[in-house]
Image (tube, rainbow, N blue to C red):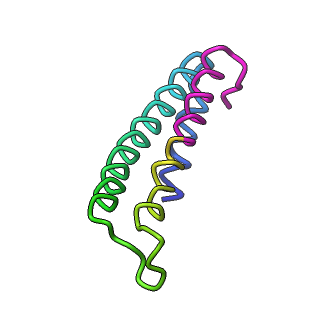
Amino acid sequence: MCLSVTAITGIIEKKSPKARKALAIITYIIVAVFCCIVCYYSTMMVIKYNNTGSTTTNIRWIKMSWVFFQIPLNYIVYILFEIEKIWGVATGKREVK
C-alpha cells in the first residue's frame, strides 16, 4: 500500500502545476462521488430500520435508525468538505502540493 501511494505521489509531483491542479480536482470529485454513494445507501438503511421499528437490545426506547443516522450525517459533512476543497483549488485559494 505504501509503495503504491509513494509511486502515485511521485508521478503527481513531476507534473506541471496546472496538471496537479486538475488531478487534485478529479481526485476530490471521485471522493465526493464515493461519499454520495455511501450517503445514499446508508440513508436507505436508516429508512429501513425506521420502518421496521428496530430498537437496541438493552435500551428499548433507542431506535436503531437513530444509531445509524450518524453515518449519512457524517458523509454529508464530508461531502461539504470535499466541495470546499474543490472550490479552493478551482479558485486558487487552496494550494496543490
Q: Position of residue 14 (x, y in %)?
A: 58, 29
Depth order, front residue of 36/65? 65
Say above or below: 50 vs 84: below
Identified at 28% across, 58% down, the residue is 51
Q: Is residue 16 left or right of residue 63?
A: right
Identified at 41% across, 67% down, the residue is 64
Say above or below: 14 vs 7: above
- Dominant SS of magenta comes to helix
Q: Position of residue 84 (x, y in %)?
A: 62, 28
Q: Quadrant of residue 55?
A: bottom left
Q: Residue furthest front?
A: 61
Depth order, front residue of 15/78? 78
Q: Is residue 85 magenta?
A: yes
Identified at 33% across, 70% down, the residue is 54
Which stretch is magenta? Answer: 77-97
Say above or below: 11 vs 5: above
Q: Position of residue 24 (x, y in %)?
A: 55, 29
Quadrant in which the C terminus appears? top right
Identified at 51% across, 45% down, the residue is 7
Q: Is residue 16 left or right of residue 64?
A: right
Q: Is residue 78 magenta?
A: yes
Depth order, front residue of 76/54? 54
Depth order, front residue of 16/52? 52
